[in-house]
Image: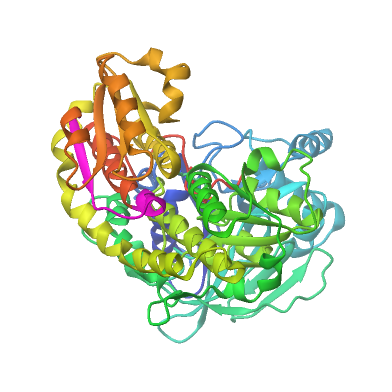
Amino acid sequence: MCGIVGYLGEEQACPILIKGLHRLEYRGYDSSGVAIINAKGDLNVYKAKGKVSALEESIKEKDTTGTIGIAHTRWATHGEPNAINAHPHYSESKNLALVHNGIIENYKSLRTEMEKNNMTFCSQTDTEVLVQLVEYMMNTHNCDMYTAVQLALKNVIGAYAIAILDKSHPDQLVCARKGSPLIIGLGKSANGRAEFFLGSDATPIIEYTNKVIYLQDEEIAIMDRSGHIDITNLSNVKQTPQLVTLQMNLDQLEKGGYPHFMLKEIWEQPNALRTCIRGRLNMADKDVLLSGILDHKEKFLNCNRIIICACGTSWHSALIGKYFIEEAAQIPVEVEYASEFRYRNPVIYPNDIVIAVSQSGETADTLAAIQLAKSKGAFLYGICNVIGSSIARATDSGTYLHVGPEIGVASTKAFTGQVITLALLGLAIAKEKKTLSDEMFHMLVNELQQIPDKMQWTLEHNKNIDQFAQMFTYCKNFIYLGRGYNYPVALEGALKLKEISYIHAEGYPAAEMKHGPIALIDEEMPVVVIAPKRGMYEKVVSNIQEIKSRKGKIISVVTEGDTVVRDMSDYCFVIPDTRDCFVPLLAVIPLQLLSYYVAIAKGRNVDQPRNLAKSVTVE
Ligand code: M6R
């Protein structure tokens, strides 16, 4: 949601912090700020509304010198997006400055308590309450900042990742987390002296070091200039951190010549999926190897039901996963919006497996949903992209997507990565349960192997979508239709268009049209129909006829060589033939490109659409 960067070392902190903020901007972009302690011991805080570039501009003439600092890019939860509510927040004395991701749920009662003690507040944020609380603890307990952070956090209800500077200790950086991720990078400056980096994810750190510590829930770390780091829990018990080597490179975080991350990530899909299936599809033996399943074979053999919890695009891929797992492995699958599941009292049987699907692995609702399922005794399986993420760590087993970092707010390669991973999972279970004939199993494995090449073909044959996207910029509404495996693709196509072009769009199962939505059709209404020559082709053709006779404009996704639907369509995108169950992996590509180019034609910022953030780490 928001992004945190921190630095302590020999170098000037400001350029490192600003670069880090740019890398984290995809997590939130309504305001940003930096706090730096200079050589004289001044603690300077600068903040600006808007993008990081606005902050950069506003600090050009300011004193930003200093080798210790923290910075933040914000996606507003409490208080409108403006410079006052932006982080870092000073304490009342201006001796402390703090940045925070997450939500302090009891901030109002804490603030009232402190106001009774004549403390004053400048902003409406929960974060200012936290920094004031730390100072309050320092004053009332006559303790150092580190101890005060422990005391303050014991009084806090909610989620946090925080970093704090104390003007009277310009050689120390303190950070803590619960619920929101925080990573500490351990590097060496040019002269070989130790330096520390902080990041709410690895993106601001990887340029300097790949040696990191993932701070655990309720841990507090203190780092100093001599290279010393101490980590304790809230009760001051020393913790032993695990040093991890990041498997990521800088190129993955750059646009690589594309105008936007979204377009880069759309085009990366063939290679991303090759990496995803590498080592998992064994073509020599026509086999599927998923260690996450093999290590827990009995669980999957004895499971009576799978529940998949997810949000947004991940929910759409989960729906495709449901169709495939039920068909291939003959296990009933329920797909739940994590945000609903977590607040119900769902029935969980001892043999249930709960799967969380999440690109970021940090979505608050999905994390809470699996925590609830765990408390009810479920076995948890995670399908995440971000390695070491909270959901990946909270689950009993799982499979990483390995599609590389996804920076564009609109999810593209993570969607196809999730669909293919769920297909691998369905095949792996089907193999153990022997629910597919050998012939069918081998045929599906063969077909899956060809998907990346067919994706490349699809991209090459649909790259001219930009030439007619302009025609749709006047549209106020879109409808997307699909049946069977392609119904979730219709939902995903509609979501992509909504989130980056701000055009209202709805996805429906094609046959549901006549139960109400068909009333919306007139000559102004573009209807995108996924109509491959597979599955319920004839029925979809009838659905198209129903729309055409009401003058709707048909934009279709058809199988190469199909002339029937093409002739009925105003615009047509072609995909190669594949098995019914794998069509979503190809059909979604023209829909991703369509949403991208319509948004570009409307002048939208596709990588940072309004009101959105990449990972939704708050409720
Ligand atoms: O990181 P997650 O997959 O858990 O995120 C879930 C949704 O927030 C995410 O898919 C969102 O809907 C995207 N913006 C869609 O493009």
Residue situated in front as seen by the camera: 379 or 182? 379
Q: Count up the numbered dots.
A: 0
Q: Kindly identify the residue that appears in the image at 67 percent across and 37 percent down.
A: 340
Residue 161 sits above or below residue 443 on the image:
above
Residue 246 in percent (x, y) is at 49, 75
**For the magenta stretch, what is the residue range?**
569-585
The answer, for residue 138, to whether it is visible in the render is: no
Residue 496 sits above or below residue 424 on the image:
above
Q: Kindly identify the residue that appears in the image at 80 percent across and 58 percent down.
A: 350
Residue 484 sits above or below residue 270 on the image:
above
Locate the C terminus and report the quarter of the image it occupies: top right
Residue 582 on the magenta segment: yes
Q: In this view, does 582 lie to the left or right of 181?
A: left
Residue 330 in percent (x, y) is at 60, 56
The answer, for residue 568, to whether it is visible in the render is: yes
Residue 484 in percent (x, y) is at 44, 41
Residue 61 in percent (x, y) is at 35, 49
